[in-house]
Amino acid sequence: MTSLLQLARYYIDDSVRELLGKEISERVSETRLDSDLDDAILAGIGAYALRRHLPGDVLRGIQVFTAAASHALVLSNLPDQKFPATPVSGFGDEAELAVINAVHLGLVRLLGCTPFAVSYENDGRLIRNVVPNPAACGTTSSWGADSEFFWHSDNPHQPFGRPGSDPRLYTPPYLTFYTVRNEEKVPTEIAALDDVVIRLDEETRNRLLLPEFEVGAPDSNDAENTAPLGQAAILETDPQGRFRARYDRGTTSGVTTEARQALDHWCAALTDTPAAELVLETGDFVIFDNHRVLHRRKAFTPGPDATARWLRRCYAA
């Protein structure tokens, strides 16, 4: 069965990367820019340079991504900079990363999206360092490494928002990442929800559309400030009639016998769903639809702390 995943891939030439890096570096060097305090300025600097230097086909692909309802987009060979050691504690000096923050937030702006943070995760900071934090050992968290992250969507314990709503109150529509380093070659796997639904029998699909489930917050959230979403459906349809899902195996349960059976069938379908394995490298940017794409990361052994796997994640709406 052919996969229904719509994945756009672009690669920019070294000459373009160097022009972008030079221009952005010069502009951010004029002052200290912090991603939490100066996100609009960083986005403006990055978007201006990206519009000037990206090839036309790449620029168009980025600008129509959300309107085209694609599942995911990868843009490779973007500018990098001199990086500090991986902040395995989870937090570092954001002003030291102004170049890649301008690239990351500039791309979010070109996508026609707004970056945002939530108060119940990551100390309310805009960009999360996805790193192997020793304090998160044994947890299925973006700060973990030794536990498998099964197929899931981010923050599924939140309701789906309506267009024009404050995105901080709802499940994030998009996840964006910039890759600092991934010397361990750990793949980020993504699967289209459409490929899961097509493998479900009608009875299971209809049961998953009913509010017979409870979905809790993931380990990365502040448990004191989050509550499970009760009377929830795993599947819903969005205003365009497309399926969207909320799911995390570790936090999702059925409240009826039929719902629990449907969850078993759902998990079985996930094991047979085709996926794209993205082995992200330094300078890779990826965005995917958190409502219509499930993702996972298998357990891995991190490298030395200073050079351990390090991705930068930002929610967008």
Image: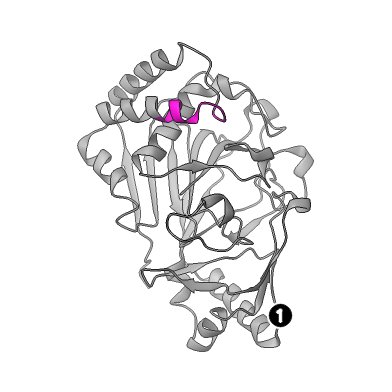
Q: Residue at x 39, y 20 (%)?
A: 24
Q: Quadrant of residue 123?
A: top right
Judge left or right: residue 272 versus residue 3.
Answer: right
Q: Quadrant of residue 212?
A: bottom right
Q: Residue at x 54, y 41 (%)?
A: 313
Nearest to the observer: residue 127 or residue 8: 127
Residue 38 magenta: yes
Q: Residue at x 37, y 40 (%)?
A: 75
Q: Is residue 279 visible?
A: no
Judge left or right: residue 241 versus residue 308.
Answer: left
Nearest to the observer: residue 45 or residue 141: 45
Say which amino acid is labelled 1.
Val
Q: Which residue is mark 1?
A: 255
Give the crowd class for mark 1: few <14, some 14-19, many >=20 residues within 10 Å. Answer: some
Image height check: is 42 above or below 207? above
Residue with the most extreme front position:
165
Residues in magenta, as a range: 35-43
Q: Position of residue 229 (x, y in %)?
A: 67, 66
